[in-house]
Amino acid sequence: MEAREPSITKTFGILTAGGDCPGLNAAIRGVCRAAYDRYHMNILGITNGYRGLIDGDVRPLAPEDFSGILTRGGTILGTSREKPFKSSEIGEDKVRAIKENYNKHKLDCLVVLGGNGTNTTGYLLAQEGLNILGLPKTIDNDIEGTERSFGFHSAIAICTDAIDRLHSIAASHNRVMVIETMGHKAGWLALYAGIAGGGDVILIPEIPYDIKAIGRHLNSRAGEGKSFSIVVVAEGALSAEEAKMEKKDRKKYRMETGLPSIAYRVAREIEEETGMETRATVLGYVQRGGIPSASDRVLATRLGTAAADLLARGEYGKMVAQLGSGIAPVDLSVPAGKIKKVPRDDPLLDTAIAVGTCLGV
């Protein structure tokens, strides 16, 4: 296909950073196919996130590299959690190396696919004079400036499937099952999966829980002849007592419990409060694995092709976002250093309450 118009960007680099998730390869494909087929750009793939740009681990990408990857999980470029601005002295050397390799390879722009940390680093590199475009990736859906991040829908499906499977175990053994999802600072995944999976209790970081309120709810269910219950808890959830503590005191308190995560703490608290047999399941990294859902494939492709259009027009310093039913750029300063949390007036919370779900209060 002939180029629609001359592209301002002639050569760009692309990297994936932070935790992997379904949809990264679909997004890489979207950016690269549109940039190559429509605008004839040169594409350089950067291995293992920002670490690859620091080390100069850069290679040209040809059509055969980004063909046939739409349904693949993970990322063909590899990833790392390298944070070049993390410490001042070492950070200065890393940022210097990034800028040198950016110029050495004659990049007109760097496209970064990642979550809060990745796009924040992108913003900081833009302040250093580099041309940056960001794409929002995370199963937590906690990136400010976009209504949805690719990877989120796939993770909801994985978590919901796990909850569905644990329902039959809970019913067979007359137990309370506590299922822990990811979501360290934001509860979007636990909230969506909890509603989709019919969770009787959903606990998220934004609403500190009262174990007595949970106990009353579970006892009420038992009194109605419901012999089992499902509790969905985000990994960052905390009790009302913990919410009053300083971070270091909370960390010390949790270490003293001798329990590995919030699911086990909540399970023990439920047993102590109600006497009900309770088991904990931590879903862990399975939430980030496997092929992307159809919805995430579409979203990642839309974001990727929109990024190619921005590259062609030379519109840098942006993150491509989903806004309503459309795709549009927002300034990289919007997501930088921020976490999109579940607001207390979010309609989905009322939806959960309306169908009888306890939110821990």
Image (cartoon, rainbow, N blue to C red):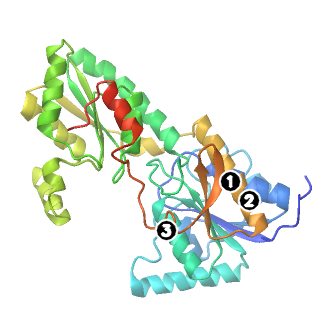
Secondary structure beneath label 1: helix
Q: Whole-percent x and y of residue 211?
A: 14, 38
Label 1, on which residue?
304
Residue at 49% over, 63% down: 335
- Using residue 302 as the reference point, say whether residue 54 is left or right of it: left
Identified by mark 3, the residue type is Thr
Label 3, on which residue?
120
Contact between marks 1 and 2 (CB within 8 A): the answer is yes
Vertical placement of 261 versus 122: above or below?
above
- Using residue 203 as the reference point, say whether residue 224 is left or right of it: left
* Residue 359 location, quadrant: top left
- Using residue 95 as the reference point, say whether residue 270 is left or right of it: left
Q: Whole-percent x and y of residue 78?
A: 56, 59
Identified by mark 1, the residue type is Gly
Q: Whole-percent x and y of residue 174?
A: 20, 18
Q: Residue furthest front?
A: 345
Q: Residue furthest top?
A: 225
Binning the other alpha carbons within 10 Å of mark 1 as few (below 14), some (14 to 19) or many (20 upward) gives many
Label 2, on which residue?
308
Q: CA distance from mark 1 to mark 3?
A: 19 Å
